[in-house]
Image (tube, rainbow, N blue to C red):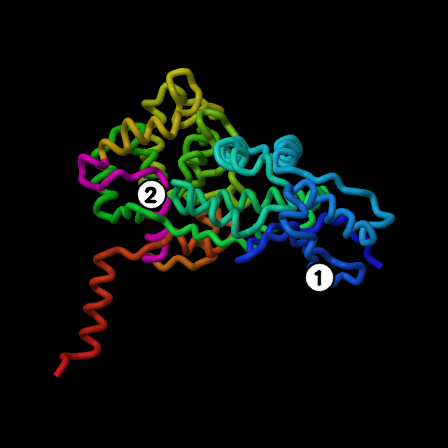
Amino acid sequence: MKRQRYQRGHLWLRKGKRTKAWYLRYRGLDGASRLEILGTLAELPTRTEARKAADRVLEPVNGGRPRREPATGAMLIARYRTVELPERRSTRAAYGSLLSRHIEPRWRAVLLDEVRPADVEAWLRELPLSPKTKANLRQLLHVLFECGRRWEMATENPITLVRQSAKRSRELVRVSVSQYRALVAALIEPHRTMVLIAGCLGLRIGEILGLRWGDVDFERATMTVRRDVYQGHVDEVKTANSARILPVPATVLESLRTWRMNAHYQGSGEFVFAQDNGRPMWADTARERVLQPVALGLGLGKIGWHALRHLFASVLQVVGAEPVVAQELMGHADRRTTEGYQYGFDDRKRAATDNVAALLGPVQ
């Protein structure tokens, strides 16, 4: 017979039209759900007294099993920070920010067994954040509770039932082929070569900044993605699939060769896109001081480095790259992620609808 964990049950105050009463839901020895009315609010005026009454009801169910002390959100988060927080710097920083700024202030004092899906959904709705950030919060909470279950700090994961869409509140700025060409023509080195790599090879900006000259094989016309840079710090690549060898087109290879002849740091172990001190450039600085001002001057909107990765994925679709080829070039673990990066170009959509109209013929 499977050993049952120590139960605390779900205790709540139900407010009826005439009376308010404490209710307890728990599982009996047979595993079936039980619902018990513990008493009215007049009989049990505080949650502490209601909890004592609940423990008396649960005593026969928990007989012979070690008591599990109730765990709070603060206890779970502290243990997660100590033993589970990812090592990758960018992920660690992102998770740490979500924990400190949002999750800890709201859930630190709450008992894990008293967290309800409806409460979490209401909290997420009230946060003045983008849907994507809210979805990230929901996912991190889910991870926390899974750890809590493994450590026997929580009996279940209520976040499984929490709904939160990751749909963008703002539409992604799309870059067309002609706009990309204009952008490349307007930039000077080293940012011109960085944009060529982003658009023609689809690398993440951290992967571009992590390139060393030894990663570029000019003889075989290949580039090996081995590392990522986040806020000036060298880190491992995002996933196992992100480490990849890519064929380099002649135009990109020639641009790299020209840049190397003019770069201050040219050794095989030195960074392709380095600051004056030899350390890798900062993505935010390159975006805010160079990429966006030039793009805005061309009327492209406030684009970021990631827009060029979306462009690469979309052009792969136009040129007929097989899905598995596109996935491997992008360095994605899931093909559906690659599909989510792709969009249709306006000129091709117009050509498609014109072709459909021509095939269907004139309307009588």
Quarter assignment of residue 128: top left
**Foreground residue among 134 and 110:** 110
Element at badge 1?
strand
Q: Is residue 304 inside the magenta stretch?
A: yes
Q: State the residue lying farthest toward the left.
A: 364
Q: Are marks 1 and 2 in contact (CB under 8 Å)?
A: no
Residue 258 is at least partly visible in this image: no
Mark 2: secondary structure: helix
Query: Circle 2 is placed at which residue position?
Result: 308
Q: Give residue 247's quadrant in the image.
A: top left
Q: Residue furthest bottom?
A: 364
Q: Is residue 77 left or right of residue 220?
A: right
**In the depicted structure, whether residue 268 falls above or below residue 17:** above
Q: Looking at the picture, how far across and down is residue 26, in whole percent? A: 71, 55
- Quadrant where the N terminus lies? bottom right
Q: Which numbered dot is residue 33?
A: 1
Q: Position of residue 180 (x, y in %)?
A: 25, 43
**Start and end of the magenta stretch?**
295-318
Q: Residue at x 71, y 42 (%)?
A: 151
Q: Position of residue 336 (x, y in %)?
A: 46, 56
For the point 40% across and 36% down, which residue is it?
205
- The stretch drawn in magenta includes residue 106: no
Q: Is residue 157 left or right of residue 121?
A: right
The majority secondary structure of the magenta stretch comes to helix
User: Compared with residue 193, is residue 5 higher up or lower down, i.e. above or below?
Assistant: below
How far across and how far down the image is residue 24, in percent?
68, 54
For label 2, the crowd category at 10 Å Cα-Cα, with few meaning under 14, some 14 to 19 and many 20 or more, is many
